[in-house]
Image: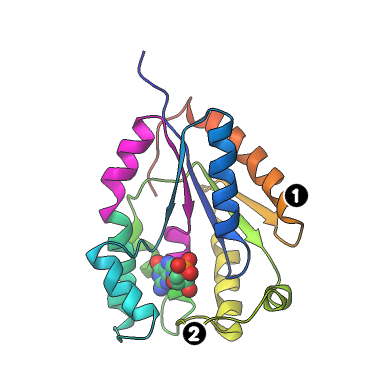
Amino acid sequence: MACKRGALIVLEGVDKAGKTTQCKKLVKALELSGRPAEMMRFPDRSTTIGQLISAYLEKKSDLEDHTVHLLFSANRWELVPLMKKKLEQGTTLVVDRYAFSGVAFTSAKPGFCLDWCKSPDVGLPKPDLVMFLQLNPSEAAQRGQFGEERYENSVFQNRVQQRFEELMKDTSVNWKVIDASQSIDNVHTSIQDHSLNAINAAQETQLGTL
Ligand code: DGP
């Protein structure tokens, strides 16, 4: 019998919501329970395209806004063969940001509509589950200062949050909103519950596309 596929699980949210911490905890918990799992993150700064993105985020270079949007999308596309291979082998992928960040961040800039922003990502593997770590901007601010990177300011992050709220109206995506103001362990428990359901459901369905 062919091995059962892994699930594609994505964590999204504004900065300081705890995505990276929770991705790591989830991978560890899944592995401990005997379910193969690996973490990925976008942008993946290790590739040639990822290095262009990284220099842009660190403000070492400037790129035209449409161009950088397409580079972020290309960075996801270049990892698709690897993602598909892992999923087919039965590994669950826990992904820190995906196409939804792409749309939310670019469409928060003036002059960008959601439809244009979504188009380069059409055809990417569709997540079985997208968890949005919800944290209001004032609580996020209490978790520490923003860093020096591009986009790390409250005005822009508020616009990003509004764009995510628009995206979450899309019922063709399996969105779950998680209250990220709870303790790390409570957030983890909710994330783990949703993930186990998604892993079980994924075994009965084919991987879709955005
Ligand atoms: P991180 O490494 O998770 O801190 O993300 C880097 C920054 O890039 C963060 O501010 C979110 C932003 N970002 C992530 N994906 C995209 C994308 O596809 N497009 C744009 N414009 N920004 C993105």
Residue drawn at x 42%, y 34% is: 91
Q: Position of residue 77 (x, y in %)?
A: 28, 55
Which contiguous range is marked in magenta?
78-104
Dot 2 crowding, Cα within 10 Å, few <14, some 14–19, many 20+:
few
CB at disc 2 and ligand 1 closer than 8 Å: no
Give the number of the disc on residue 148: 2
The answer to if 55 sits in the magenta stretch is no
Which sits in the foreground, 137 or 31?
31
Which sits in the foreground, 137 or 103?
137
Dot 1 crowding, Cα within 10 Å, few <14, some 14–19, many 20+:
few
Kindly identify the amino acid type of the residue bearing the numbered disc 2. Glu
Task: Kindly state the secondary structure of the residue where label 1 is placed.
Answer: helix
- Can the viewer see residue 103? no
Residue drawn at x 64%, y 46% is: 191
- Residue 131 lies left or right of residue 97; in this view the side is right
How many numbered circles are shown?
A: 2
Which sits in the foreground, 57 or 102?
57
Which sits in the foreground, 68 or 174?
68
Q: Is residue 106 above or below residue 63?
A: above
Residue drawn at x 55%, y 58% is: 20
Question: Which quadrant would residue 81 be assigned to in this image?
Answer: top left
The CA span between labels 1 and 2 is 30 Å
